[in-house]
Amino acid sequence: MNIGDELIFEVDGGEVSYNIVGFTQGAYYNGNDGYMLLDGYERIDEFTSFTYYINLKEGCDIDAWNSNFKKNSSVNSITNEYKYFNSTAMLYKRILIILCIVIIALSLLISCFVLYILISILLENKRREFGIFKSLGFVTKELIYQVILSILPFAFGATLFGTILSKKLTDPILSSLLNSIGIFRFGKEISVFY
């Protein structure tokens, strides 16, 4: 679908056509929703409910205003969109925090396991060399420093590679995750890395 395309709906045995005039996005209904103007909707059915979005001045008590408005009007329900948005955003924030903690824990576990294997193999292969160094007067602390310094360049290179890789892949992965709940332009609008 593109802007300017025509949609045709069958209503009560007849057809009603509409033109697409714009696009929107939202995280509700997995992004599968649409909007139309009141006169367009009334071509299909009688409209009995209205939604008003009211922006209040900074510092205004929203809940007090809502309860006062509800007492003095005939509205069915009032929703504090600010609280609703924050509660919804907090849900996704908690999910992403848990996901990040799990990924970090798994990464640390795998890294420790790989380092353990590499150091075990290194020590086993250099056992004879370490014996010679000990007989020449090296102390254990100096041999530990030697092993650490031999591993350090590889660890630094792997860290640099991992950082560059995560910088390139984080936005597309996060964007595809949010696409699955209906937010389609996240990766183009907000970047995790600045």
Image (spheres, helix red, strand yellow):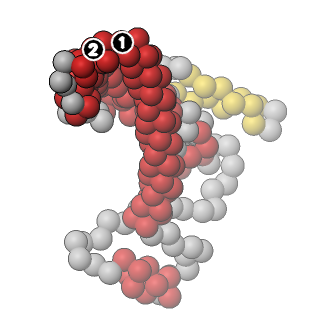
The reply to whether discs 2 and 1 touch (Cβ–Cβ < 8 Å) is: yes
Residue at which label 1 appears: 128
Q: Quadrant of the C terminus?
A: top left
Relative height, residue 185 to residue 133 (above, below) = below
Q: Residue at x 46, y 45 (%)?
A: 101
The kind of secondary structure element at disc 2 is helix
Q: Residue at x 51, y 72 (%)?
A: 78
Distance in Å between CA atoms under marks 2 and 1? 6 Å
Residue at which label 2 appears: 132
Q: What amino acid type should be assigned to the residue bearing mark 1?
A: Arg
Q: What amino acid type should be assigned to the residue bearing mark 2?
A: Ile
Residue 102: x, y in percent? 51, 42
- In this view, the residue in front, 40 or 102, is 102
Q: Answer with left or right where residue 192 lies relative to residue 93.
A: left
Q: Residue at x 50, y 49 (%)?
A: 98
Q: Residue at x 32, y 81 (%)?
A: 61
Relative height, residue 19 to residue 86 (above, below) = above
Residue 49 appears in the figure = yes
